Image (tube, grey):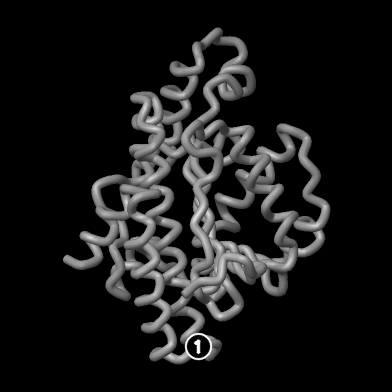
């Protein structure tokens, strides 16, 4: 079973964010006197018009984190702990402060993300810039694409940009029999935030973080760090831990039920 007292070797993380309407109004639409909500609506429409797929996602520079979940993983790849930052308030500034405090505390742990080089880490770095947080050790260790202290699984799986892979985390999670996307997708997060559904956003973030952990395990089979038999033992150990954690994280029941089905 996991040893919560040992120092983690890996920090598996995922984030969810919303557009910063006040910043959009001041930067992109300063002459138009728009409200934050109207600035977001205009920026989303402009994004849709510019996107080949119709995505309304606003550039990462205008995003604020509203959920960050972290799974601490030991050197033997067992799950040590699950953390959802600043629950149940989910305040962006406090989420960011606690995230970078943890990264500094576990300075030798590798960060593991799915597409984090393109979104999660730049967003968290820009949030640190906004609020004046020092990232000295992280900047020195983790921003090298190939040899840094950050493993972006999507970057790794697509041969560092040589191959264009479609389907995202959902594809790779479901490829190995894990839940993947259920009844929420990333483009619903802003609407959910407006409706005051912060806990549901956080639950969705937690599910993606767990999927990222299981995808990470399978990539370690490819690298030869663990055998397939070991991976299956780790998966069963993680499943047992999630079942134990359902009182603390009730949404895990949905994750486990979807996994079973």
Residue placed under numbered mark 1 in the picture: 226
Residue 108 pos. (x, y %): 73, 68
Task: Relative to 228, say whether 113 is above or below.
Answer: above
Residue occupying the point 71% across, 33% down: 130
Where residue 128 sits, quadrant-wise, is top right
Residue occupying the point 35% across, 39% down: 200
Q: Foreground: 104 or 48?
A: 104
Residue 240 pos. (x, y %): 35, 69
| Residue 156 located left or right of residue 253 | right
Residue 106, can we see it? yes
The image shows a total of numbered marks equal to 1
Residue 15 pos. (x, y %): 50, 48
Task: Relative to 9, say whether 50 is above or below.
Answer: above
Residue 165 pos. (x, y %): 41, 68
Q: Foreground: 170 or 90?
A: 90
| Residue 80 located left or right of residue 138 | left
| Residue 128 located left or right of residue 82 | right
Outermost residue, left side: 261
Residue 172, can we see it? no
Where residue 109 sits, quadrant-wise, is bottom right
Residue occupying the point 38% across, 46% down: 203
Residue occupying the point 60% across, 23% down: 23
Element type at mark 1: loop
For disc 1, the neighbor class at 10 Å (few under 14, some 14 to 19, many from 20) is some
| Residue 60 located left or right of residue 216 | right
Query: Which quarter of the rendered picture does the C terminus lie within?
Result: bottom left
């Amino acid at each position: 079973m996991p040893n919560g007292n040992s120092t983690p070797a890996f920090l598996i993380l995922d984030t969810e964010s919303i557009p910063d309407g006040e910043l959009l109004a001041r930067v992109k639409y300063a002459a138009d006197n728009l409200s934050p909500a109207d600035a977001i609506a205009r920026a989303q429409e402009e994004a849709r018009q510019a996107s080949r797929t119709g995505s309304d996602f606003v550039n990462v520079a205008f995003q604020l984190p509203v959920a960050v979940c972290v799974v601490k993983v030991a050197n033997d790849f067992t799950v040590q702990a699950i953390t959802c930052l600043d629950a149940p308030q989910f305040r962006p500034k406090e989420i960011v402060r606690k995230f970078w405090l943890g990264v500094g505390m576990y300075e030798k742990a590798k960060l593991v993300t799915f597409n984090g080089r393109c979104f999660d880490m730049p967003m968290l770095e820009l949030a640190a810039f906004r609020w004046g947080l020092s990232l000295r050790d992280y900047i020195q260790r983790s921003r090298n694409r190939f040899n840094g202290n950050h493993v972006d699984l999507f970057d790794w799986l697509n041969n560092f940009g040589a191959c264009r892979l479609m389907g995202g985390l959902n594809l790779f999670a479901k490829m190995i029999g894990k839940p993947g996307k259920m009844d929420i997708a990333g483009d619903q997060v802003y609407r959910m935030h407006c409706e005051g559904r912060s806990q549901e956003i956080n639950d969705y973030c937690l599910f993606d973080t767990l999927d990222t952990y299981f995808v990470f395990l399978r990539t370690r089979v490819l690298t030869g760090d663990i055998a397939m038999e070991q991976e299956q033992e780790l998966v069963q150990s993680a499943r047992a831990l999630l079942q134990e954690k359902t009182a603390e994280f009730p949404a895990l029941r949905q994750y486990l039920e979807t996994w079973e089905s």
